[in-house]
Image (spheres, rainbow, N blue to C red):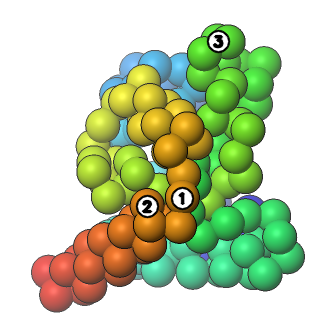
Amino acid sequence: MYKIRSIVSNAEELKRELAHLNELGRPDFKITHDPRVTSVGHVLRKTSLDELPQIWNIVRGEMFLVGPRPTSFGANTSTQWQTERLDVAPDLSGLWQITGRGITGSVDQLRLDIAYAERRCLWLDTEILVRTIMADISALGAN
């Protein structure tokens, strides 16, 4: 998955040192004010511009515009009920981005991804895309 780098180059080593601050259950990793994010990275992430190169993944057919977000872990780290989200190709935006924008916990994120997989349709995709664009425009105005 293509992305603009928004964290320091030694982020993986720092991740081990910061593991005690992880706000999500493993294998997810999130720190509200992650010290690994660069100053430019904060702006890129807030406006979602760091994800712009993922359009190339969409063109190549590796991702869709809407669906569950890609993860860095596979089915072997998930319980049986969680693997349903893997039935749909990863996306650029999804239900959890427009309802929690990274605030919800990993179980809530999984539930939203599964809800999308079970209910996906053109109307829901359109609504998610419009709400994503509105959220990104709002973030641009907040800078």
Residue that appears at 64% across and 43% down: 71
Q: Quadrant of residue 91?
A: bottom right
- Asked whether, in this view, residue 69 is left or right of residue 25, the answer is right
User: Which residue matches tag 2?
Assistant: 124
Residue that appears at 26% across and 79% down: 134
Label 2 Cα crowd, 10 Å radius (few <14 / some 14-19 / many 20+): some
Amino acid type at image mark 3: Thr
Amino acid type at image mark 2: Leu
Query: In this view of the protein, can residue 82 be seen by the observer?
Result: yes
Residue that appears at 73% across and 64% down: 63
Q: Secondary structure at mark 2?
A: helix
Amino acid type at image mark 1: Cys
Q: Secondary structure at mark 3?
A: loop
Q: Are marks 1 and 2 in contact (CB under 8 Å)?
A: yes
Residue that appears at 53% across and 67% down: 122
**Earlier-in-chain disc, 3 versus 2:** 3
Query: Marks 1/2: CA distance?
Result: 5 Å
Q: Secondary structure at mark 1?
A: loop
User: Which residue matches tag 3?
Assistant: 79
User: Which residue matches tag 1?
Assistant: 121
Label 3 Cα crowd, 10 Å radius (few <14 / some 14-19 / many 20+): few
Q: Nearer the viewer, residue 98 or 72?
A: 98
Name the quadrant of the N terminus. Answer: bottom right
The image position of residue 60, as x and y in percent, is 85, 76
